[in-house]
Amino acid sequence: MQGRVLFIDLTSGKSRIEEDGGLFTEFLGGTAVATELLFRHGNAETDPLSPLAPVIFAIGPFSALYPAATKTVALFRSPLTGELGESHAGGRFAAALRETGIDAIVITGASDRPVFLHIDGQEAKVRSAGTFWGQSAPATDRILREALEQKGRKLSIVRIGPAGERLSPMACATVDSSRHFGRLGLGAVMGSKNLKAIAISGKGSVAISDSEAYGSIYQTLYDRVVRSDEMKKYHELGTPANVLPLNAIRGLPTRNFAQGFFENAIRISGEAFLEEVNVQHIACAHCPCGCIQVAELREKFAPAHYSTVRVSYDYEPIFAVGTQLSISTPQEILRLIAFIEKQGWDCMSMGNTLAWATEAFLSGTIGEAETEGLSLSYGDTRSYLEAMQRISEGKGVFFRDLEKGTAFCASKYGGDHFAMHYGGLEPAGYLTGENAVMTWVAGVRHSHLDDNGYSLDQKLLMKDMPLEEQVRMQVEEA
């Protein structure tokens, strides 16, 4: 890696490139580099939505060079937790960065008007986004591709939806067709900078000093990936392959984590989605797995007339707006996911927050005075679509508050004892045991990907192991 870091100051609109090869030698991987850059250019006391709060994007030495090394990391201070914000996304972003010759991006300042960042090769321009500010995340992608795509130059586009513009702390940033910097509120941080999108493309190539050795290693890794059992499972079903196994071990969170078994799991399993609504498998750049599952959703808009939209789905959205809300058909789940995609919310945070709101309503913690007449009940897709519509339009104090997440709502309205969050972050879809909980509590970003807790729970199923030994195993794994 050349160690090229692109710095953009949105306040002035100026950019520069610095070469810091030592940074990428001293710190291994994109996450370590991005964390160091965040410490160098940020301050732990700075408000996450301040112009002084930086956003860092980085790739690692394997990114877009070896099979399945597809991710770009984003580092920022989270407006949801106030702590470290670390989020990873696939798609084409890592490959596009590699083609520009840029290894990391540091964005500081804030524009006084809506803008997007256009990176073409190593040239960066801050351009007006005034004509499409307010557009949904999918619409923004379409608008920028039509305006910027050139023959032989593949774009990668990171953008926010209206939720990020409203500075919702659960707003995500969507990458290309269906990937996300999902957790911890990157969308709000971009929105606070009036940064609607980043469009990036390049035409450079990577110089390989020993092409024969590189080809041999690449082929070895490729073969190991494509011939593994996991590859077959995830290519055919994607991460929704996990629905039925987790349900079988009572580890599938259901109705606000009240239980780990969903009675209708078979109806919304990966197998059911594949049979009923799946139309395509797609892959991130340089990944042979092709685990991204795409469905077609038909929506009736007049008698005998339907529109269709393609919606990507994964295990976590199925858990978040399926089992958590007791929704029992793929079509209804897709309707909820599609709404969330347009607004640009993190699906896990929104689904968990709606589950908290439902339990709060059913338990009498809140009532129709707060919901302004809307009854929330598990299994009622209509009420959840209406709730999200009110959130998106800012109708009513309670619905504006829901966009701030579970922890905020529980602190204001009560119901903290059934508010599922760790450090302010709503959890992922695993009710597997104490190791998952320890991981969420102790993890730097309170995420299921901080450690292997949920996986360790499954390995230790039906085994009697002292808790101290389980902690030792987690520490060794970390």
Image (spheres, helix red, strand yellow):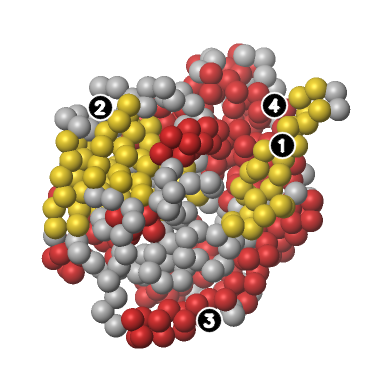
Query: What is the C-alpha distance between the residues marked 3 and 2?
Result: 47 Å
Q: Nearer the viewer, mark 4 or mark 1?
A: 1
Query: What is the C-alpha distance between the residues marked 4 and 2?
Result: 38 Å
**Residue 77 placement (x, y as % from top left):** 29, 42
Query: What is the C-alpha distance between the residues marked 3 and 4?
Result: 48 Å
Please tell me which of labels 2 and 1 falls first in the chain: 2
Please tell me which of labels 3 and 1 falls first in the chain: 3
Query: What is the C-alpha distance between the residues marked 2 and 1?
Result: 37 Å
Q: Which residue is nearer to you in this view: 154 or 352?
A: 154
Q: Is mark 4 on a helix, strand or loop?
A: helix
Q: What element carries label 1?
A: strand
Q: Which of marks 4 and 2 is in front?
A: 2
* Amino acid type, mark 4: Ser
User: How many residues crowd around disc 1 within 10 Å: few (fewer than 14), some, or many (20 or more)?
Assistant: few
Q: Mark 2 points at which residue?
A: 111
Q: Mark 4 points at which residue?
A: 383
Q: Nearer the viewer, mark 2 or mark 1?
A: 1
In the rendered image, which quarter is residue 228 located in?
bottom right
Q: Which residue is nearer to you in this view: 433 or 186?
A: 186
Query: What is the C-alpha distance between the residues marked 3 and 1?
Result: 37 Å
In the picture, the disc for residue 120 is none
Q: Mark 1 points at which residue?
A: 308
